[in-house]
Image (tube, helix red, strand yellow):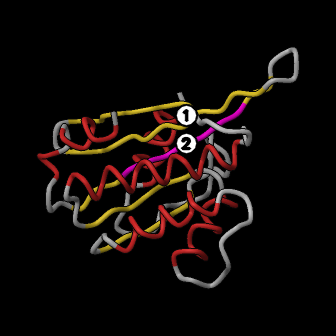
Amino acid sequence: RLLEFADQLADLRGAEVVMATDGGAERGPMGAGISAWAVVVDGKRGIRKIAGAVGGADMSSHLAEAWAIAAALFVAVKAGIRALTLVCDNWNVVRRARSILDRRCALPKLSPALWLRIRASAEAMEKLEVCWVPSHGKKEGWRAPQPHLTGRWRYLNGVADK
């Protein structure tokens, strides 16, 4: 599915693109969990979205957010996107991603292969920014860094969250 989605983004080859990611997890009545991720692409032909489930034993929202970042980077590389701004509403995941991409910290003991995949995809990008956006309208005074539009980032985050 990710390759098919990347093919649908051919119009963005060589472009600078903003993608919003989201991940979430829920526990069922019997204690079993489920987690999922989503990637939203803001492009020339409007907003496009892909989402999927997270497999494995770790069903945390933290891991689901990391899966979303991995999916976004994979799609961006395959689509030939030159420069990517990734917007994520999980501050801890943003901080972890920045540290791993800058090689300022070791890979986490949980899911090191996922983080290696994230790093490898990131290194294939010409330009990459991983940025935080407050979720669900929180922190009303927050502003996106220039030249980005605060309202657009919040909107994209909301689309990823649904």
Assess whether residue 72 is covered by the magenta stretch: no
Please state the extent of the stretch shown in magenta in the rendering.
19-25
Q: Which residue was labeled with disc 1?
A: 161
Mark 1 Cα-neighbour bin, 10 Å: few <14, some 14–19, many ≥20: some
In terms of secondary structure, what is the magenta stretch mainly? strand
Dots 2 and 1: beta carbons under 8 Å? Answer: yes
In front of the other: 21 or 78: 78
Q: Which quadrant: the N terminus?
A: top left
Q: Which mark is residue 149?
A: none
Whether residue 84 sits left or right of residue 105 in the image: it is left
Q: Which amino acid does label 1 sit on?
A: Asp
Assess whether residue 22 is covered by the magenta stretch: yes
Q: Residue 22 carries which label?
A: 2
Residue 129, relative to residue 158: is it above or below?
A: below
Q: Give SS at disc 1.
A: helix
Q: In which quarter of the image is residue 95?
A: bottom right
Q: Distance between the residues labelled 2 and 1?
A: 6 Å
Tell me where residue 125 appears, x and y as whole percent.
31, 70
Whether residue 63 sits left or right of residue 87 in the image: it is right
Tell me where residue 117 appears, x and y as whole percent.
47, 62
Residue drawn at point x = 43 percent, y = 48 percent = 71
Mark 2 Cα-neighbour bin, 10 Å: few <14, some 14–19, many ≥20: many
2 or 1: tag closer to the N-terminus: 2
